Image: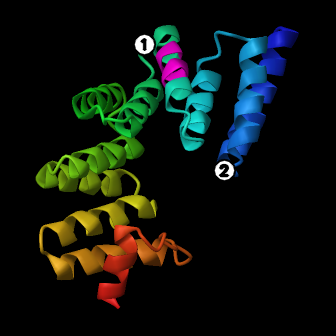
Amino acid sequence: MPAASAASDDVAAQCRAGIKASDWQIAVKLCTQAIELNPKLTAAWIDRCQAQLALAKVSEAMVDCRRAVELEPENSNAYLRLADVKAASVPVDYSGALEDYAKSIALNPRNGLAYNNRGVTRNSSKDYKGALADYNMAIELEPSDSRAYFNRGETLFLLGQRELACASFRQGRALKPDFKPMPQDFDATYLKSCS
């Protein structure tokens, strides 16, 4: 492995560690270094996209995700992150986001996060049946990820199915006992009504 490639992989791994720690500024800096060392390192573009999006730099995230798709058009995670950016755009590009989540899932049908995130977008566009199907698939694929349980609970509340919603919230809470929703978040209201 050439030295530049090994160095870019090293820096990209540090970028991923920054993302895991939710240290978004550091992640952007490290991913940028990895890209400078190897502009064809798709993972660094995807990771920087994720970090830029977490920093609410939507247009920068869009550029990074589009570059990742150009580099590797068969990369499920590139489409996942591109869809996340479209879902975070103002106004939301619902059809574009749903189309890219579908591409991500077609490329990797075992990508639970793609199902979960598509469920969030479907829920936001009031496609509650589609959202529930996606959350259930995300749970089937990644049963230890609490996000889909909380998201499914929210959708069930919106459908007036309080008991099922509370059961889903309890499952999510059992997986992530330290979950603390923001006070203005729907989940805070729903959790309170389940107590």
What range is drawn magenta here?
A: 62-67
**Residue 121 in which image quadrant:** top left
Q: Is residue 63 magenta?
A: yes
- In which quadrant of the rendered image does the C terminus lie? bottom left
Q: Going 47% across and 71% down the picture, which residue do you hit?
A: 181
117, above or below 139, in the image = above
Residue 97 picture location, percent across and down:
30, 32
Task: In the rendered structure, find residue 114 and report the number of the disc placed on it.
Answer: none
Q: Are marks 2 and 1 in contact (CB under 8 Å)?
A: no
Q: Going 78% across and 36% down the picture, which residue do you hit?
A: 14
Q: Going 19% across and 52% down the picture, which residue do you hit?
A: 133
**Residue pointed to by mark 2:** 22
Q: Earlier in the sequence, mark 2 or mark 1?
A: 2
Q: Going 71% across and 27% down the picture, which residue do you hit?
A: 31
Q: Marks 2 and 1, how far apart in space? A: 27 Å
Say which amino acid is labelled 2: Ser
- In which quadrant of the rendered image does the N terminus lie? top right
Q: Residue furthest right?
A: 3
Near mark 1 (Cα within 10 A), the count class, few <14, some 14-19 or many ≥20, is few
Badge 1 marks a residue whose secondary structure is loop
Badge 2 marks a residue whose secondary structure is loop
Q: Main secondary structure of the magenta part?
A: helix
Near mark 2 (Cα within 10 A), the count class, few <14, some 14-19 or many ≥20, is few
Say which amino acid is labelled 1: Pro
81, above or below 68, in the image = below
Residue 138 picture location, percent across and down:
33, 51
Task: In the rendered structure, find residue 73 and report the number of the disc placed on it.
Answer: 1
In this rendering, position of residue 7 left or right of residue 76 = right
